[in-house]
Amino acid sequence: MANLNLGRNEFGQPENAGNTLTKEAAQELLLSWVINTKLRVHMQQVGYLMQRWAAEKEGLDEQGQWRWEMAGLLHDADWDQWPDQHCIKIITELESRKICPEIIRAIASHGPAYFGVDPVTQMDKMLYAFDELSGLVHAYSLMRPGGYDSMDVKGVKKRLKEKSFAANVSRDDIQDACERAAIAQDDLIAFIVKHQPSAVLF
């Protein structure tokens, strides 16, 4: 894999604070850049989790919730077609569109071990926290006859301990993300299990 270290810690311009894409424009970007339907589902699920967290835990208004959702929705936008430019391409695109630095930085910091950008803001930390664990929970739902029905934290943790299950999901990143966000892993799992089934896919 190419060196994905971004080599910087500042993203966007301060004067663009609060700027977002419209929901339609964000969806258009996702659909045109991401061909892999499984990756699309992942991005939409993470976006929804970010929106729910912003609403329920951060108490943000609708505009604030959309900033969080947009970060989740587009965090892997360049992974499908340009894996060797992962994060670089989407960051460049959003900077060219004068998008809020907070959103761009959250995307840049969703994999600190890979991109060299530490999560600092709460948005940064929660995007990092949701990313890997959301994927594992979804993989678990696909192997259960009832999907998300009656899924519990204990079942998810059992799969988390099985290194061969969803082997591409980094257990180290999950642990690191929970520590950085100061949230118990059980609480994060419970939040994902509760909300992820309601993610609207397009």
Image (cartoon, rainbow, N blue to C red):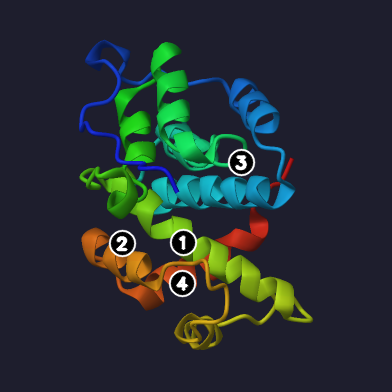
Q: Going 63% across and 32% down the picture, which residue do you hit?
A: 30
Instruction: Tell me whether the residue at label 3 lies in contact with that at label 2, contact meaning CB atoms closer than 8 angstroms.
Output: no
Task: Tell me the CA gap for discs 3 and 4.
Answer: 26 Å
Instruction: Inspect the image, locate mark 3, and give the three-letter code of the amino acid beneath it.
Output: Asp
Graded by Cα atoms within 10 Å as few (under 14), some (14 to 19) or many (20 or more), the crowding at tag 2 reads many
Instruction: Inspect the image, locate mark 1, and give the three-letter code of the amino acid beneath it.
Output: Glu
Instruction: Tell me whether the residue at label 2 lies in contact with that at label 1, contact meaning CB atoms closer than 8 angstroms.
Output: yes
Task: Tell me the CA gap for discs 3 and 2.
Answer: 23 Å
Q: Which mark is residue 80?
A: 3
User: x, y (%) of residue 91?
Assistant: 41, 27
Q: Nearer the viewer, mark 1 or mark 4?
A: 1
Mark toward the start of the polypeptide (2 vs 1): 1
Task: Tell me the CA gap for discs 2 and 1.
Answer: 9 Å
Rendered-image quadrant of the C terminus: top right
- Write down the residue under mark 4: 189
Q: Is residue 56 above or below residue 72?
A: below
Can you name the residue that lies furthest to the front here? 2
Q: Is residue 160 left or right of residue 150?
A: left
- Write down the residue under mark 1: 132
Q: Nearer the viewer, mark 3 or mark 2?
A: 3
Secondary-structure class at tag 4: helix
Task: Tell me the CA gap for discs 1 and 4.
Answer: 11 Å
Mark toward the start of the polypeptide (3 vs 2): 3
Can you name the residue that lies furthest to the right here? 145
- Write down the residue under mark 2: 177
